[in-house]
Image (cartoon, coloured by chain):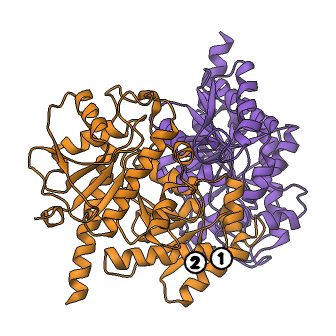
Chain colours: A purple, B orange
């Protein structure tokens, strides 16, 4: 059998920047009993780093070397840690907790392998352990974020981030830019694209049309233009365009109203216009249970909201709960997608 | 005795714009048993409008006319509704649910009387029922908001809005302006002034120095200037200035972190930079329990976050819970202030 035959979805974890907490929390997730029965785990990274991480957390679990020619994988062995060895840098070739271009290059390589395996359907999903954007760029990445690197590998023109907790699902029209720049980036096209991606996500993973709502930019949704004109100039035309295309979407809804309405079930998801508009409500309700889903890719990819935490790297104290949540969410998405595909094939 | 001798704090309610739900919810609060023992209520408005509102909600309670020459008030009668008659417009002189400059002028007059009574210490606090800003301005108000009108009457140079729920207290550096304009208005001076007002509020009403924190403007607090420079240029200098003046204040803290930290007790209050940054978390945790306190006035004034709701005016269906909450909060502040003053006089 190949790993793709595994009963639980096979979820790969590129182990992230070796200078940070990625390898440690990836190893902890691979050992976590709460994952058993929900997902088969495949770590993607340098075997020597994984061994070091296992030693750090006091595990003598053996590494099972998974062989890949990017299509065929060997079967996993039950009590072992499945590792797809991607030669990068080994222990001693970097300083723990210090930004390193070589470490960035190595972590980018692991993400590339994971994306290719997902495209080849050898894995059902992947979850990236934390990387450092500056290290990735100094290590050769020509994109502003790792998600854009994946989108390029997949030949995907447009992606969006969805932040999810148990209580809310929020798609982001803009994300990691200054608030001033975010306002400039909010265009009719960009909102419509995000609404389309959100709608497509529900069709692909739930098999049903969602009820969506777009948040306003200004207080009280601009109150008829007296507190900002972006609603009139941009958000309303975008919502009208999406509705004309048959999408069930409301808006603009004042940002201090839309999230509690979504929480009480009025909407399946919220389209937010800027980073904090999405993340304030999500993190307030669920500070540690947040998962990020990259929507629009032809593969399933989730990640965590936290970073590499260089300050506590390789100290054995990093909490893997967020990464575990992202793995379980990825496995759930894989099962949901399978169900929709089986249903639509009937 | 004068009303100021009442055992419970005497809280006045200017009944708001007669075209809206103000008179109805003010009458409901005056009749609400949950207020008894917490506050004595004095409605300020045209007696004919109050009578109409009582009739609307099916109350045959008699109106007790409170006489005032702006200093002396007659004693209230237990089972009656205390009304300070401010001649404005009567029933039939306006259309319910339709914006009216005369109604704006009448509601502004009631706010003026309430402010003057509070300055004269004839009442301990007042709570404004909803007014319509456009009606106020067409009715003669030369200010951008009713709070500024009150500040002018009080000769107060600088005020700030504090939004409060059971779970969070948030001061606003900017409020009812477009997001673009808010960013332009966020200056070192304005942040420092708001921090000072927040600090003074806790000294005046709690008798202790608070632990404060200022929210960041950009994602991840600008991440060292890579996602916006306002933290470096404005927020950090403001926090340093306030700290140099002896105030216990942290910041800038990323906006998606600061509110859950405040909620878990790390801070007594948050200084937010723009309207939705304050109101998203407050309303998400407590959609209906929100009270607005105008901080910096020499008198106690609270209000509700909702508006005149012209669409449901005079239908008998308006919910007075928010106004009741604002009245109870005002009475609590009056008691807290009294306690601090007694303690500091010893």
Which residue is depicted at the point 61% across and 30% down?
A212
Label 2 Cα crowd, 10 Å radius (few <14 / some 14-19 / many 20+): many
Q: Chain of mark 1?
A: B
Q: Can residue A172 be spotted in the picture?
A: yes
Quadrant (top left/top right/bottom left/bottom right) for the N terminus of chain B: bottom left
Kindly report the distance in space between the C-alpha atoms of the residues bearing marks 2 and 1: 6 Å
Image marks 2 and 1: residues in contact by CB distance under 8 Å: yes
Which residue is tagged 1?
A: B188
Between residues B8 and B292, which one lies in front from this camera angle?
B8
Mark 2: which secondary structure? helix
Which residue is depicted at the point 37% across and 62% down?
B115
Q: Position of residue A227 (x, y in %)?
A: 65, 48
Between residues A123 and A305, which one lies in front from this camera angle?
A305
Q: Toward which corner of the image does residue B206 lie, by quadrant?
A: bottom left
Label 1 Cα crowd, 10 Å radius (few <14 / some 14-19 / many 20+): some
**Same subunit, tags 2 and 1:** yes
Between residues A7 and B221, which one lies in front from this camera angle?
B221
Quadrant (top left/top right/bottom left/bottom right) for the C terminus of chain B: bottom left
Which residue is tagged 2?
A: B192
Q: On the picture, is B258 further left or further right than A272?
A: left
Q: Toward which corner of the image does residue B345 lie, by quadrant?
A: bottom left
Q: Can residue B211 be spotted in the picture?
A: no
Q: Chain of mark 2?
A: B
Q: Toward which corner of the image does residue A195 lie, by quadrant?
A: top right
């Amino acid at each position: 059998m190949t790993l793709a035959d595994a009963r639980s979805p096979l979820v790969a974890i590129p182990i992230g920047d070796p200078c940070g907490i990625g390898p440690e929390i990836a190893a902890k997730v691979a050992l976590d009993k709460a994952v058993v029965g929900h997902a088969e785990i495949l770590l993607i990274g340098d075997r020597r780093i994984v061994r070091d991480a296992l030693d750090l957390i006091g595990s003598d679990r053996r590494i099972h070397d998974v062989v890949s020619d990017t299509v065929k994988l060997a079967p996993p062995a039950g009590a072992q840690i499945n590792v797809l060895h991607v030669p990068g840098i080994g222990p001693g070739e970097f300083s723990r907790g210090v930004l390193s271009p070589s470490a960035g290059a190595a972590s980018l390589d692991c993400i590339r392998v994971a994306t290719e395996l997902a495209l080849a359907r050898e894995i059902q999903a992947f979850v990236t352990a934390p990387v450092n954007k500056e290290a990735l760029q100094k290590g050769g990445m020509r994109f502003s974020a790792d998600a854009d690197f994946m989108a390029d590998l997949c030949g995907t023109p447009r992606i969006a981030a969805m932040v999810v907790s148990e209580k809310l699902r929020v798609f982001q029209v803009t994300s990691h830019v200054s608030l001033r720049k975010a306002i400039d980036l909010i265009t009719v096209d960009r909102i419509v694209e995000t609404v389309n991606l959100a709608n497509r996500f529900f069709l692909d993973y739930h098999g049903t049309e969602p009820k969506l709502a777009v948040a306003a930019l200004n207080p009280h949704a601009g109150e008829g233009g007296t507190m900002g004109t972006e609603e009139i100039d941009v958000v309303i035309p975008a919502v009208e365009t999406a509705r004309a295309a048959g999408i069930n979407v409301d808006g603009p809804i004042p940002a201090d109203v839309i999230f509690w309405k979504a929480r009480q079930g009025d909407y399946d998801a919220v389209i937010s216009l800027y980073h904090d508009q999405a993340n304030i409500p999500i993190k307030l309700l669920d500070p540690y249970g947040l998962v990020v889903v990259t929507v629009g890719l032809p593969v399933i990819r989730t990640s965590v909201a936290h970073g590499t935490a260089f300050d506590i790297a390789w100290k054995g104290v990093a909490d893997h709960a967020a990464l575990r949540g992202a793995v379980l969410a990825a496995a759930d998405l894989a099962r949901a997608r399978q169900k929709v595909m089986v249903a639509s094939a009937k």
